[in-house]
Image: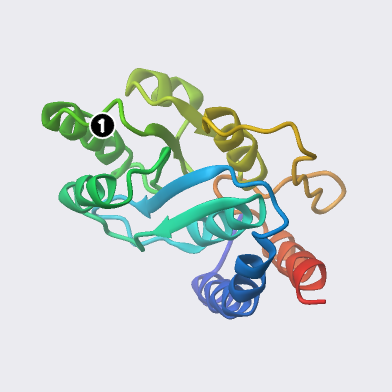
Amino acid sequence: MEIFLPELMMIGDSMKATASILEPKLLRQKAVVQKQGTVVIGTVKDDVHGIGKSIIATMLMAAGFNVIGLAVYVPNSKFAEAIEEYEPDILALSALMTTTVSMQEEIIKYLKALGVRERPKILVGGGVVTKESADKMDADGYAADAVEAVVVAKKLSPSLCLEKMLVMEVDNGKHLGHFGVGSIADQYTLLRFLILEYSG
């Protein structure tokens, strides 16, 4: 699949604009959605990609999670500080580049050394992350796309409920790929769905 940089920048700006519309409404909706738990999510150090991470954060909020976003290029110490401050049920680590997947494993080792590894469940994903690499780095969960991230997070959350899960089929059944980095058409289809679903 070929994506040009201007298109990637455009979808990133669209996601930010959409999130600014949706987040206040999603926060109000939490009163009627069963709470799932708290998720701290961020893109690992040396990786500046945040589009997919932002989409997942929005979808987790829609599913009832309290989401703490740490932006991109997050150093290990910031993840550890967030665990201390927010005591999350899940720590979600995103890495899009082959050169930054190793940072996910480094963070897990760092948390083990601090003695806080067992406190949150760790969910990993990204364009180049695989189930095999997730198992190797001792992550608790892996998601290949944004929809699966919500499903896996619900399984990892101690406040799991059996309510109807949010499942969005995009582009004739193809889900948003690799933590949100699908085709440009898929991205816009998802954004339109979210706006129509939650802006009424």
Which residue is at the far right? 172
The amino acid beneath tag 1 is Ile
Q: In the rendered view, tell whether residue 112 sits above or below residue 29.
A: above
Q: Could you tell me which secondary element the residue under label 1 belongs to?
A: helix
Q: Residue drawn 52% across and 29% down?
A: 156
**Residue 62, image x, y percentages:** 66, 57
Which residue is at the far left? 113
**Residue 55, image x, y percentages:** 58, 59
In the picture of the structure, the residue carrying the numbered disc 1 is 108
- The front one of 50 and 109 is 109
Question: Is residue 121 something one can see in this rendering?
Answer: yes
Question: Is residue 180 something one can see in this rendering?
Answer: no
- The front one of 106 and 8 is 106
Q: Residue drawn 60% across and 67% down?
A: 27
70 on left or right of 62: left
Q: In the rendered view, tell whether residue 30 sits above or below residue 137.
A: below
**Residue 160, image x, y percentages:** 61, 32
Q: Residue drawn 78% across and 49% down?
A: 168
Marks counted in the figure total 1
**Residue 78, image x, y percentages:** 21, 53
